[in-house]
Structure formats: structure tokens, C-alpha cells
Amino acid sequence: MITTVQQHILQQQQDMLKATGREATGTFSWLLSGITLAAKMVEAKIRSAGLIDVLGAFGAENVQGEQQQKLDVYANQALLHCLGLRDSVAALVSEEDEEPVTFNRDPETGKYIIVFDPLDGSSNIDVNVNVGTIFSVLRRLPPEHGTLEESILQHGFRQVAAGYVLYGPSTVLVYTTGNGVYGFTLDPAIGAFVLSNERMQMPEQGSYYSVNEANAASWPEGYRAYLEMLRTGGLGREYSSRYIGSLVADFHRTLLKGGVFLYPPTSKQPKGKLRLLYEANPLAFIAEQAGGVATTGVGRILDIKPEGIHQRTPFCVGSKREMEALRAEPVW
Ligand code: AHM
Ligand code: MG
């Protein structure tokens, strides 16, 4: 029989609660069902993107100063709508919105904060190449331990769940609640995400590296030496390169095939390009749960104390072997 993502979450929760003797409330699975509903809305829109008038720029810039695409706007609204209705949500933090959207809910009920990048890789939308949605779930701190803002800016190691949806030849959802990584494939016949990858593990070594090499001249020197080492067989094989420019797609390949993905600091983006809260943290959580490693090139991503919701970070993620070699390389 099939297992849908909803059934899977409930099952995982029941197993966990059986171990602690508490009762499952179903709140968390109800919350995640908001994400899967939005993902299905986005996927339907993407599938018909060439047919209806959703391609192209929306005519506005988002808070990062980038042109918003119509599909970005749609994806953001779908997530805000599907999650905002859930009583358990205290705040929603989106790449597309400068400030968090907060709900005036009793902290006892409104326990969760969802941080998301509604449509990542938007430069790929118009050319029919993979895009994705990334999300991270945090638990609100009890009022005596911190404000809502402090709850949003918790370390990545405090995430209670993280995941992504990749809109590719098929639509897949990958998530973790800190108890392994699970992959689901959307079955269009029944409109449900069905379990397809149980306890996903990143291979200990791969044979691809993934980085925008056009920036090579402005990386810290060590990165160039590191890639040269990979290319020339320093880790026992001569690496090949793959770069889609859609983080979710580049990460998904790295999760399945191993290897390494890098977005180092550049002269244009001295702090790195990718965002800590809704890009690096959730993918770092998944990578670690799958036996991989995620760093800034120096320290563990999940140990960074966030200072702002749109903070950027250098991001290096991949298989153990390549990431150990990166640690040995003075990349700064
Ligand atoms: P976005 O959130 O505006 O789409 O930007 C993030 C994307 C990632 O998906 C991808 O890894 C990266 O930007 C690619 O950047 P570049 O074009 O500089 O290589
Ligand atoms: Mg993004």
C-alpha cells in the first residue's frame, strides 16, 4: 500500500510520542498539510506556465532588490494563504516579504514559525528549468524565554522540521523532522505525495562539484585550489561539474548522487549570496540528517546565530569525503 506524506508525518509523530508517553495532537501534520497544499497549487501553476499568462516579470522588486516574477508572487501568496489559516502558526517569514507576517495568536496555540523561500531559482522559470520551494519550521519560544522575533532568529540546530519541494520532471518533496530524511513523489493521479525514498542517505563520496565558476576570480584563493584538486584526482577520481543555478535542484542531485555544492563569498557578495534562514539552514539540516556536512567553508551552518531574517551566508554542502577535504583546505 502507498504511504502519503500526511500519513507518514502522523506515523512518525505517533512513534515518537509512544516513546515519550505523550499523546499526538496532529497539529504538526495539519501544519505541514498547509505546505503540501500550497506546493500542489504552485506545481499546477508551473505545469501550465507556458499556457497562461504567468511568465515574465511582475513589475515590482522584492526586498532583495530583485525583480519579482509572477510565479514568485503566486507561490508566496499560496503559502501565506494556506499556512496563515492554521491556528498553530505564530509567524510566517518569506524571502519575498521584508518583515515577518505575524498573527496575534495565543502562544499556547500559535506554536510554530514557518520560514520559506516560496520559489527558489526564479531565473530558471522562464526557460522551463527546475525551481523549488524551501521551508524551515521553528518552535516559538515560551514568552518567558523570548519574544517572537527572538524565536524567529533561533540557531539552525533548533529547527523542528525542514524540507523542500522540487518542481522537476516529477514533483518531489523531501523533509526531515530530525529523524532521518524522507522523499515523496507527487502522484498526479491521486494528487498526493507518496513515499518514494525511505531514510535517504547521501553517498559518502560523489563525482560532481557544483558551483558558479564564472565567479572564480573573486573567490577566496583556497576555493580555486580545492576545485583544481577535485578535477585532477586528488580524492581518487577526476570530478565533473554540474550547475543548474537552482539551489533546490543542485542540492537534490547532491543528496542523491553525492559530491559538493558551493556558493563561496564573491567580491559582489562578500557574505555569500544564499540566505541563511530559508536556504542554507533547512538544506543543512537535511544534509546532516542524510549523513552529509554543511558549512560556511569554515564553521557549521546550523551553529550560526542569525541576526536578521534575510541574512546571507557562504554555503558549502555535500558528501563527507569532499567536505572533509574542504575543511582541510584554507579557503579563506
Ligand atoms: P533566488 O532565491 O533569487 O532564486 O536566488 C537563489 C538562487 C539559487 O537557487 C541558486 O543556487 C543561486 O541563486 C544561483 O545564483 P547564481 O546565478 O549567482 O549562480
Ligand atoms: Mg531563493
Image (cartoon, helix red, strand yellow):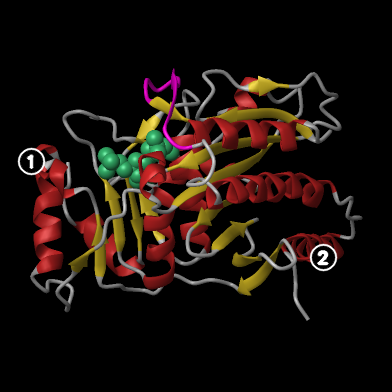
Amino acid type shown at disc 1: Ala
Residue 97: x percent and y percent? 54, 22
Within the image, what quadrant is residue 235 found in? bottom left
Residue for point 39% across, 43% down: 126
Residue 269: x percent and y percent? 24, 30
User: Where is 50 relative to 310, above or below?
Assistant: below
Q: Depth check: 126 or 148 in front?
A: 126
User: Where is 271 relative to 166, above or below?
Assistant: above
Tag of residue 19: 2
Drawn side of residue 291 relative to residue 173, left or right = left
Drawn side of residue 48 relative to residue 207, left or right = right
| Residue matched to label 1 | 217
Residue 159: x percent and y percent? 60, 44
Q: Is residue 289 visible?
A: yes
Q: Residues within 10 Å of mark 2 (few under 14, many from 20)?
A: few
Q: Depth check: 48 or 210 in front?
A: 48
Q: Is residue 275 visible?
A: no
> Does the magenta segment cover residue 293?
no
Residue for point 41% across, 56% down: 249
> Does the magenta segment cover residue 64?
yes
Badge 1 element: helix
Q: Residue furthest front?
A: 51
Drawn side of residue 64 relative to residue 236, left or right = right
Residue for point 31% across, 54% down: 244
Badge 2 element: helix
Q: Are marks 2 and 1 in contact (CB under 8 Å)?
A: no
Q: Depth check: 282 or 252 in front?
A: 252
Amino acid type shown at disc 2: Ala
Q: Which residues are magenta?
A: 55-66
Ligand 1 visible in quadrant: top left
Q: Residues within 10 Å of mark 1 (few under 14, many from 20)?
A: few
